[in-house]
Image (cartoon, rainbow, N blue to C red):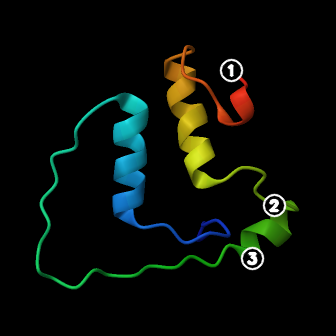
Amino acid sequence: YNLGGHETITLREVVDALATLLDRTPNISITKEKPVRLLANSAKFYKAFDFNPSVSLLEGLRRTVAGQDPTLPLENGKS
């Protein structure tokens, strides 16, 4: 299956979110190459498993990191 969510997000946004959540400064290089845009069509998976994402990618990252660090607050102030 080709999986993706209902939102479009850049790699830079993912890196920035993880850097914030992990309190780190990323070391990335920006090139002059035109970025590749990849889109996933998850309709087949959603239909096969009667699935619909209930959290955003960024919230999922927060929850993943919080699983490693229980002091990190989650969306809506829950921990």
Residue 46 or 34: which is nearer the viewer? Answer: 34
Question: Which residue is label 3 attached to?
Answer: 43
Q: CA distance from mark 1 to mark 3?
A: 31 Å
Q: Secondary structure at mark 2?
A: loop
Question: Which residue is label 1 attached to?
Answer: 79
Q: Position of residue 25 (x, y in %)?
A: 22, 38
Res 65 label: none
Res 52 label: 2
Q: Name the residue type under label 3.
A: Ala
In the image, what residue occupies the spot 39% across and 82% down? 37
Crowd rating for badge 3 (residues with CA inside 10 Å; few <14, some 14–19, many 20+): some
**Furthest residue in direction bottom, as rendered:** 34
Q: Mark 2 and mark 3 in contact? Answer it, CB < 8 Å.
A: no
Q: Secondary structure at mark 1?
A: loop
Q: Name the residue type under label 1.
A: Ser
Q: Position of residue 57 (x, y in %)?
A: 59, 53
Q: Position of residue 5 (x, y in %)?
A: 64, 65
Left or right of 20 on screen, residue 68: right
Left or right of 25 on screen, residue 57: right
**Furthest residue in direction right, as rendered:** 50
Q: Name the residue type under label 2.
A: Asn
The answer to whether residue 52 is above or below residue 73 is below
Q: Nearer the viewer, mark 1 or mark 3?
A: 1
The answer to whether residue 2 is above or below residue 58 is below
Q: Secondary structure at mark 3?
A: helix
In the image, what residue occupies the spot 79% across and 67% down? 46
